[in-house]
Image (tube, helix red, strand yellow):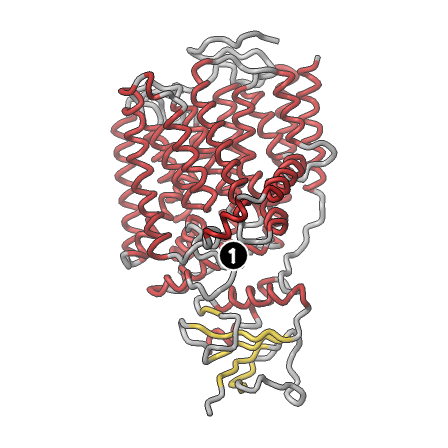
Amino acid sequence: MAGLASAILCAATGFVLISLAWPKGSGLRSDLLLKVSFCVGCGLGLFSFLYFLSLMFSVPAKTLAGLEVVIFVLLSVLLWTRNHNGHNQSFLRNRANTSTGFLGQILAAGFTLSLIGALYRCGKELAANPQGTGWDAFAIWNLHARFLFRGGEHWRDAFSGLIPWFHPDYPLLLPASIAHFWTYLGRETAAVPAALAFAFTFSTVALLFSAVSVLRGRNQGLLAGVMLLGTPSFLRQGLSEYADVPLSFFLLAAIVLLILAGRVPQSNFSLLVLSGFMAACAAWTKNEGLLFLAAFAVARLVIPAPWENWAIWLRQMTPLAATIIPILLLIAYFKLAVAGPGELFSNSQIMLQKAIDPSRYWMIARWFLKDFLGFGGWFLMPGTLLIIAYATILGKHGEASSRTGAATCAWALVLTATGYFAVYVITPYDLRWHLMWSLDRLFMQLWPSVLFLVFVTVRAPEPATALGCPAPESSE
Amino acid sequence: MPTRIAVAAIVLFSLLSAGRFVFAPVKPFRPAGLPLPQYEKRFEKLRKRLPQRGVVGYLGVGWDSRYRLPAYYATQYALAPVVVENSLEPELVVGNFAAPLDPTTTTWPANLFPVQSFGDGVVLLAKRRN
C-alpha cells in the first residue's frame, strides 16, 4: 500500500509540475497523454534529487516523505489558483490530430498490435527476471541502490574504490529512485526496479507517440510509435534494468519540450525551463547524459543566433541557466565530494597517445557504421534504413516555427554522438571490447529522439494543416 | 503511391521485428549459473553473521571461468552494504565454493582458517594470527 501511495505521489507531483509549465489558459485535461507521459520521469527526477539531498543532510525518511507531500500540496494549490478558469484548449495541438480513413485505421491497428505484443513480452520477461537481465543491472545500478538503502548513515560506502568495475562515479537518478521507494516500503523488493524499467520503457513510447501526434498529427504519431515498438533492442534494453532507456527518455523529453517551447509565446519560458530540467535529469542518470547536457547547452546557445537579437536570447537563456546550474552544482558535488574518480579520464599522456592514433578512428568509424545498421536488433530490414527511405520519400515539412528548435535538437544529438566517438578514441579499456559491449546501447539512447525529430520534420502521410501555422509546402 | 509503400514498409517490417521479439523464448538470467535470487539465498546466513558494514575479502574456488567474475559480483550484490574486496587481505574473507565443501578434502590458504561454514559452499574465513 505504501509503495502504491508513494508511486502515485511521485507521478502526481510530476504531473502537477508539468501542468504548471503548460501554457496558461490550457486546462488540466488538454494534451493529457503527453503530460502523463512526462510525469513519471519528471516525478522520479525530482524525487531522486530530494532523496540524495536527504542522504547528504541526514534527513529522516519520515521527514522526507512529509516534505514531499508538502511540495505536492503547494504545487497543486499553485496549479489550482492558476488554472481554475482554464479551458481544455490546447495551444500546441495540430488540427489534423485525428486518425482518419483507411490509413489511420491500419496505423492504429499496427500500433495497437505492437503495443499489446510489447506489454505481453514485458510482463513475461519481468516476471521471469525481476532483477533484470544483464550484468550492469545487478553489478552496478541495483547494487548502488542496495548500498544507499541498506547503508543507512554509511551510504557513502556505496562509492568505495575497492570494488573493481563498480563505477562509483555513475550518477544516481536510478539507484536513488529505487532506494527511495524501498525506503517508503520499508523493505527491498525486486518489483521496484522492475516497475521503474517498465515505467521508463512505456513512458518513452507514450511520449514519442503523443508528442509527434500533437505536433504532426495522429497518423505520424502512430508511425513513430510503431517504429519504436518495432525496435526489439529498445524493449530488451528497457527490461534489462540498465540506465540507457531512462536516459533515452530524458533526452527525448528535453528535446520535445524544447520544440514545444518554440510554439508558445516568447514571453512564456516555463516549457524551456522544464526542458532544461529534463536535460539535467539526463545528466543525473548517466555520464552520457552529462555529455548530452553540454551538447544541448552549446546548441541552445549558438543555434538561435544570439547576435541577431541579444535581448530575446538573454531572456530565454536566463531561466534555462537558472534551472540547469543548481542541478549541475549538485551533480558536481556528487562527482567531486562523494563519488570516486571516474575511469575514463585517468591518464592524460596515454589519452593523448590514443588521440593521435589514426587506426583507432578507423576502427570506431567501422563499428559506428556496422552498429548503425544493426543496433536495433531488427528483422530483415534495419530500421535506420527504413527511416531514411521514409524521410526521403515524404520530404521535409515546411513549418517555419519549429525549424530553429529542430535544428537545435538535431545539433545537440550530433554533438552528443560526436562526443561518444571521442570518448571511444581515448577510452582506457580495450577498444574492441568497449565498442562491442556499449555502442549499441549508446545508439539506443539517441534512437527515440532521432525518431521524434525525423517524424516532426518530414511531411505526414496525410496533408496536415497546423493550427495557427503555415500549411506544409505541398500536399500529397 | 511511394508514400503508401513507405508507410506500409514501416508498419510491416516493424511488426515483423516486434513479432519475432515477442514470441522469442524468455531466458532466465543466471549470471553465476543460478538465478540471482537462488544465488543470493546461499549467502543469507552469512550476511546475518557479518558486521553491519566494513570490508571483507573474497575467495572464489572451483568456478567455471565464465562464472568466476559474475560469482564475485553476485556475492557483492548479496552482501551489500558490506564491501567485498576481491583479495585475501581483509581480516575476514568470504569463501565462495562452486560445489558444497567436503571438510575432509578441503584445504585453505595458509594464512586463513575457517570460522564457520554456512552450507552450499559458503564459508567465512579469518586471517591467521601468528
Task: Name the residue that disc number 1 marks.
Answer: A190
Q: Chain of mark 1?
A: A
Q: Position of residue A407 (x, y in %)?
A: 47, 23
* Relative height, residue A102 to residue A240 (above, below): above
Give x and y (percent) for residue A333: 32, 51
**Dividing the image into 4 quarters, which one contains the C terminus of chain A?**
top right
On screen, residue A20 versus residue A475, left or right, reads left
Tag 1: amino acid: Ala
Q: Position of residue A147 (x, y in %)?
A: 43, 62
The picture quadrant where one finds residue A408 is: top left
Position of residue A439 in the picture relative to residue A89 (left or right): right
Report the residue at 52% width, 22% height from top: A456
Would you place residue A280 above or below residue A192 in this image?
above
In this rendering, the answer to whether A229 lies above or below A304 is below
Residue A315's image quarter? top left
Position above or below: A232 against B56: above
Who's the residue at 72% across and 40% down the image?
B20
Residue B114 is left or right of residue A93, and the answer is right
Q: Nearer the viewer, residue A113 or B38?
A: B38
Nearer-the-camera pick, A58 or A335? A335
Q: Label 1's element?
A: loop
Taking B9 as reference, is A406 left or right? left
